[in-house]
Amino acid sequence: MDMRDYIAALKKHGELLEIEDEVDWNLEAAAISTMSNRVGGPAVWFKKIKGYPKGYTMLGSPYAGKRHQCWRRMAITLGLDPNVSWNEWGRELAMRYTHPIKPTIVSSGPVKKNKMIGKDVNIFKFPLPYLHNGDGGRYGGTATTQISKDPDSDWVNWGNYRWMAHTKNKLGGDFQVGQHMSDMYYECERRGEPMPFCIAMGGDPAIFIAATMAIPKGYSEVDFVGGMRMEPVELVRAETNNLLVPANAEFIIEGEVRPGERWDEGPFGEFDGYMNTPRRPQPVYRINAITWRDDPIWPFIVEGTRFNDSCSAVSANWGPILAKAARASGMPVWNVINLPEASWAWPVWSTDVPDRGYIGECSDFMWSMTFFVWVDKSSITDPDVDLNDSSEFLEDFVTNVRHDRIYRSRENKPMSNIVAWASIEEKLQGYNANLIYDTSTHPGDEPKQRIKFETVFPADVQEKAIKKWKELGFKEEFKLKKLESMFKV
């Protein structure tokens, strides 16, 4: 599948709006995509962009799902029925995640059809969007995949990192310690060497899933794309460096990040929903070449708006993998979900609590993962809390959190420099404490019976009520909630 196949699949499932009228790349396209995000609407394909040739189009919010079905377009991406349940989605994703497939190398591909090299490079020849009023520049890099290689091994990272255009051949990014690409760059810089890079825009939508996943250090995301697609990804060699890139991408941007070179980047409206990323010196992507397909499609995400692609990806993709890893470690975890309203910021674990030491074990497991640098709050709940219903979790949180079950870590935990609550000084310091809110039932606690349709009415009364509901002609079907683990208990 490539971006064009994916667009056809979105259209088939009623998840695509095509706009034929001219739309401005300067805020207008982002505003329309934001409106669609807010109401749980479709991806938006802008077919005519102000100031750009016919055939140059933009695809806004390609991966955003509905609030209560954040995995919907992720399922379409993997060729599944978009109406699969949360548990069905989680089981399928975890199965494919644990069966990676190595890529194959081909001699050419659609992305090689058109080329700019050297002094001819001009990133502004393509419709980069201006996303938020107040951004430091045109952030073309949101639905993006940066490709970089570890200087000491064969490990190649494919990650989703933002970038904005400084000039026609220079881009600015956000290089945070702890991110795989950033760590590769800082090691190259320590040695006084440039870091080659490639940036893939578009292509197989499964690439976006892998690029936003929490894949451990040393493992190459392209193998996991193959696993999710259940066939090898076709790669072709870049024009100006030795990196391999997806042959069916819409665009490939190639170049190097030189040691010691900095340029002010930002501000930017980030995933946490605030214009709180200050302008500050960041490394520079120097572009040496751009290749692209005929009639290219530029995908973009309006970060920070609700409910957008990043919310969908992290909510849909992190939870099943975290739950799978926890159960593989012997922990009786039923489900994990990153609350969509919190984007990356609040994973909730539904789990049995077998003994008094388990909460500490669960906490250690969470914070041992390097990508939890992005997370400073987490919650632990009982298995009968429906994690895909934020209102049910909120009720559980408000009614059951106790002062003596709010656990605080030491003050020296690494911290993301994007979090909204922190001052600039705190972000630059880079450390804070983490919090865990525990509303689970511990051994010896009095049992709790939640008041739900499923728990306070006998089965025969439930059946009568549901039958009557249908007879009355209500369009919205009432469905029973079943207590079900993502994995066999």
Image: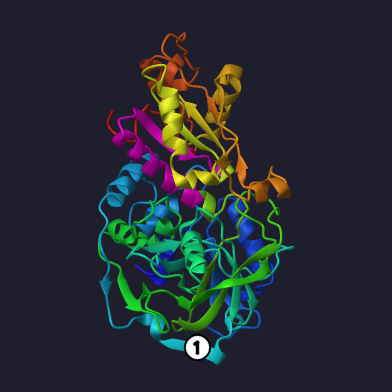
Residue 407, position as x, y percentages in the image:
55, 25
Chain part drawn in magenta: 312-340
Residue 474 or 327: which is nearer the viewer?
327
**In magenta segment, residue 261:** no
**In magenta segment, residue 330:** yes
> Looking at the picture, which amino acid does disc 1 mark?
Met
Give the class, few, some or many, for how many residues have Cα within 10 Å of label 1's Cα (few <14, many ≥20).
Answer: some
Which residue: 54% across, 76% down?
Answer: 57
Residue 132, position as x, y percentages in the image:
69, 62
Which residue: 30% across, 68% down?
Answer: 233
Residue 364 or 79: which is nearer the viewer?
364
- Quadrant where the C terminus is found in the figure: top left
Identify whether 155 is placed above or below 369.
below
Main SS class of the magenta portion in the image: helix
Q: Is residue 410 visible?
A: yes
Residue 146, position as x, y percentages in the image:
47, 67
Residue 282, position as x, y percentages in the image:
63, 65
**Numbered disc total:** 1
Which secondary structure, mark 1? strand
Q: Can residue 480 be seen in this view?
A: no
- Quadrant where the N terminus is found in the figure: bottom left
Left or right: where 269 falls relative to 343: right
Residue 98 or 148: which is nearer the viewer?
148
Which residue: 50% across, 88% down?
Answer: 116
Q: Residue furthest right?
A: 134
Left or right: where 136 falls relative to 356: right
Q: Which residue lies furthest to the front in this view?
A: 191
Quadrant position of residue 471? top left
Q: Name the residue under label 1.
A: 116
Colour scheme of the picture: rainbow
Identify whether 370 is placed above or below 13.
above
